[in-house]
Image (spheres, rainbow, N blue to C red):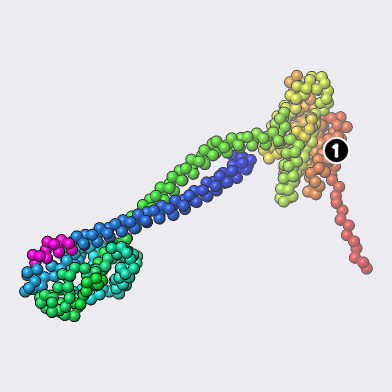
Amino acid sequence: MSLSDSCVGIPLRLKFNVILISIFLISLLGAGVYYYGFLEKGAIDDVRRDSEVLMETALAIRGYTTDQVKPHLDPLNVDRFLPQTVPAFAAVETLRRLSERYPGYEYREATLDPTNPRNRANGWERGVIERLTALQKSGTDDQVEATGTVGEGIKRSMYVARPITIQNPACLSCHGSPESAPASMVKLYGKTGGFGWNIGQTIGMQVVKVPMLYPLEKARSTFNTFMISLLIIFGLMFLGLNIALSALVIEPMARLNRRLEDLATRDFLTDLVNRRRFFERLGSEMSDARVHNTSLSVVMFDIDFFKRINDTFGHDSGDLVLKHTAIRVRELLRRSDCAARFGGEEFMILLRETPIDAAMAVAEAVRAKIADIPFEQVGTVSASFGVAEWNHEEDAHALINRADKALYEAKDSGRNTVCRAKDAPVRRVLVESPAV
């Protein structure tokens, strides 16, 4: 790819890719935020549903114990109190076995003044009970419930708590006073706790805990898979769009740009660079020669009696002479040199890193190549040459003017010859003598 192609492709591709990546990053950020929130909400809803199922399971065990177990075991409590007849005990013990199989899934009945000491509420549980009591006093719903999270890191759990409120007068037969309670229960737990309860009193709470680690990790895993899939899809799309951009836009534009550049900088007849492009190249080579302190020479020549060729053989034959002259010149030049059609039948040659003697030899070779081989339809044609070496001080126009004057000297000398330009005048710097 040429420099001009790069000038076309790089900015366009860069702008396209910057826009594409910007759109993708904004879309990825928006999709990521939305999807992560969606997955996290789904995970929390799953945890909440599991906690509600666990709570309803505990209530079902309590109801079953009250209806199906307690009536058959109560007569045995006279001699020896059986905790298994207590619905709360049955629910806690049953779900404790579940938590052994599924760690983190817990059910507990915590009370402020329990009969069984293991049911005594800790500090966190006391706070939740107080909140439930306040909700009962201010709320109008029959079902009061408190939810939230407890714990940190991998032990973080969601809890659902419901108040334990004395509503059944039968409860007071065991928790009214020590005297009215079964003697076997008092003998097992003593008289210090679990008595003096009243109808409508909130004495504790039922609370279930469900771990949030597994649903949230599943949500994160799903999110990561989703994001990686988006990145892969974008990568493939990015590659495909860039390939399509190159094939459908950049390459056609590069070809068009090369064509336009050729039209702007090349002579359509000889395929040599034109006058404007030659001056651009000359300026660049002069800068390089100044930096590296190298030689630089130019050769100016034109076809002798070219008007006579046009008048005698026609303009088509004249054009053919110009075209084949350009071909012969190119055959003798290096890739680093530059030949241009300067105007009409006039040509210029730029010879980089070439002193005047070598430039004279090149000009002589070109002169012989033109003069020694006859042209089709026209026959023998000659050219006159002027050669000048840059002195690292003059500008491009001054250098061209010296070569042009040498060219006219060659014509005045009989044509079909090479003349060396006079040296450029040396700039004199006057240094004033110090005053005595």
- Magenta region includes residue 9: no
Mark 1, Cα crowd under 10 Å, few <14 / some 14-19 / many 20+, is many
Q: What element carries label 1?
A: helix
Rendering quarter of residue 83: bottom left
Q: Position of residue 12 (x, y in %)?
A: 59, 43
Compared to 389, does 58 lie above or below? Answer: below
Residue 21 versus residue 28: which sits nearer the camera? 28
Identity of the residue drawn at 27% across and 58% down: 50
Identity of the residue drawn at 31% across and 56% down: 46
Rendering quarter of residue 398: top right
- Looking at the rendered structure, the kind of residue marked 1 is Lys
Residue 430 placement, left or right of 345: right
Residue 39 placement, left or right of 115: right
Q: Position of residue 188 (x, y in %)?
A: 13, 76
Q: In which quadrant of the rendered image does the C terminus lie?
A: bottom right
**Highlighted magenta segment, given as a residue range:** 61-73
- Magenta region includes residue 67: yes
Q: Position of residue 281 (x, y in %)?
A: 72, 42
Mark 1 — residue?
A: 405
The answer to whether residue 156 is visible is: no
Identity of the residue drawn at 6% across and 74% down: 79
Q: Position of residue 331 (x, y in %)?
A: 69, 32
Identity of the residue drawn at 26% across and 71% down: 202
Rendering quarter of residue 316: top right
Q: Is the magenta stretch mostly helix, strand or loop?
A: helix
